Structures are given as structure tokens and as C-alpha cells.
Image (cartoon, rainbow, N blue to C red):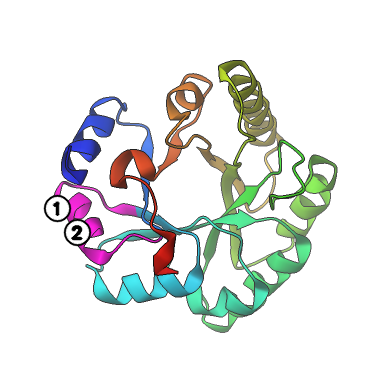
Amino acid sequence: MTIKENYKNVVSELSKDIVLVAVSKTKPVEDIKEIYDAGCREFGENKVQELIEKYEELPKDISWHLIGHLQRNKVKYLINKVKLIHSLDSVRLLQEIEKQFSKSNVIANTLIQINIGREESKTGIMLEHLDELLQEVEKCEYVKVRGIMATIPKGDEKSCRKYFSDMKNIFDNLKEKKLKNVSMEYLSIGMSGDYKYAIEEGSNMVRIGSALFGKRNYDLN
């Protein structure tokens, strides 16, 4: 099937309240245009440099999501270019986002990335440090947290559902807390291999790459 057909098939399975972020990392502009022409306006990139390059080449009504680990020295390049930073995972990164975005008087919309599987190979804040980060968010003027995100460990359906359910519980608990600068609008969980489980467990934002574009071409990096 073509990329456009893949996109239409996935969209047909999603209700209107689910945000589909097409993960376009390592994919050429031509492939992104195919999905854009089919109606997609939300695209996710892992690397700041690649996001910026595609931002310059593609239509300006695209909403870009930075879904990969964000280095503090790259924060300034995202101002006025991203809809959502999915990978807020430390107080130091929060402070840098606040510092850089304040210079341009721009609000940074973010998701807190949680390392729900406690994997050393993955970024994301550990749950025991979440409250500390939220306390610092409440002090900010230019950073807003719009939800939470996770990339779960690989596993079978049972383990996937357990992690997704845990994330939904965290999401619901944070929604009840009514914290300053924190609103639980997006639960960003679920990728190409498990997004159907994620949605059934409460996700309202899925990040889908290979199910749309095919396997990634890492030779481009």
C-alpha cells in the first residue's frame, strides 16, 4: 500500500478525539507531503535539526511535535516552531525552556515524559521525581504542561496494557490536582505496534511512524 493509503487506513480506525502524530523522523520531505496531502497536519520529529530543516521546507500550517530527547543547548531553536515538546524530563531542562522562551515572550507547550518502565536506555523522568518537577513548573511564566508522554518497554499485550493503564492513572490523578501551569489535555502513549491497546486504555494522542511510512531509513542521519 502507498503511504497515503496507510494513513487513511489508520485514520479510519481512530475516533475524532484522538490526535494522530505522524512520526516522520528520517523520512524525506516527499513522503511527508504525501500524508500532508491526505489531510495530516501533525508531524513528530526526534531531532531538533531535522525538525528545523523540514519546518523550512514544508507548509507552515503543519503542527510540529518534538518527540525525542531534547538537549538544553537546542531549546532556543524550537521557539515559534513547535506546537508541543513531548520530552520535558528534568528540572534543568524546564529551567532552560523557561529561560529561552522568555527571551521571545513565547509560551512553550510541553508534555512531561515519564520513564514508566524505568529503563536505563530511555529518557524520561522517574515517578519519584515527578512532584519536584511539577513544583518547579508552577513557578514558570513561559512553560505550560499540557499532559504526559511515555515510550513503554517492548512486550506482549498484557504488559503494554499495564504500562498504558499506569500512565492513565497518573494522568487522571494530575488532572484532579489543579496545579498552576499544568493541564492534562494530552495523554501521549501508543505507537505503531501498540496504539490500539493504548487507545483502549485511555490514550488521546498516538505517535505513529512505521505503520504510515514503512520502516525507517537511518542512513539519512
Report the amino acid beneath label 2: Lys
For image coordinates 69% across by 65% down, the residue present is: 94
Q: Is residue 137 left or right of residue 102?
A: right
> Residue 154 or 106: which is nearer the viewer?
154
Q: Mark 1 = which residue?
A: 37
Q: Position of residue 73 (x, y in %)?
A: 64, 79
The segment highlighted magenta reads 26-42
Q: Position of residue 150 (x, y in %)?
A: 61, 41
Q: Position of residue 36 (x, y in %)?
A: 20, 54
For image coordinates 69% across by 44% down, the residue present is: 114
> Residue 119 or 106: which is nearer the viewer?
119
* Most distant residue in the left direction: 37
Q: Is residue 195 visible?
A: yes
Q: Position of residue 1 (x, y in %)?
A: 17, 37
Secondary element under disc 2, as helix, strand or loop, is helix
Report the amino acid beneath label 1: Asp
Q: Are marks 1 and 2 in contact (CB under 8 Å)?
A: yes
* Most distant residue in the front direction: 219
Q: Is residue 80 visible?
A: no
| Crowding at mark 1 (Cα within 10 Å: few <14, some 14-19, many 20+) | few
Tell me if residue 147 comes above or below residue 200 in the rendering. Answer: below
The image quadrant where one finds the C terminus is: bottom left
For image coordinates 65% across by 27% down, the residue present is: 163
Q: Is residue 100 magenta?
A: no
For image coordinates 43% across by 24% down, the residue present is: 196
Q: Is residue 38 magenta?
A: yes
Tell me if residue 167 comes above or below residue 93 in the rendering. Answer: above
Instruction: Identify the disc placed on residue 33.
Output: 2
| Crowding at mark 2 (Cα within 10 Å: few <14, some 14-19, many 20+) | some
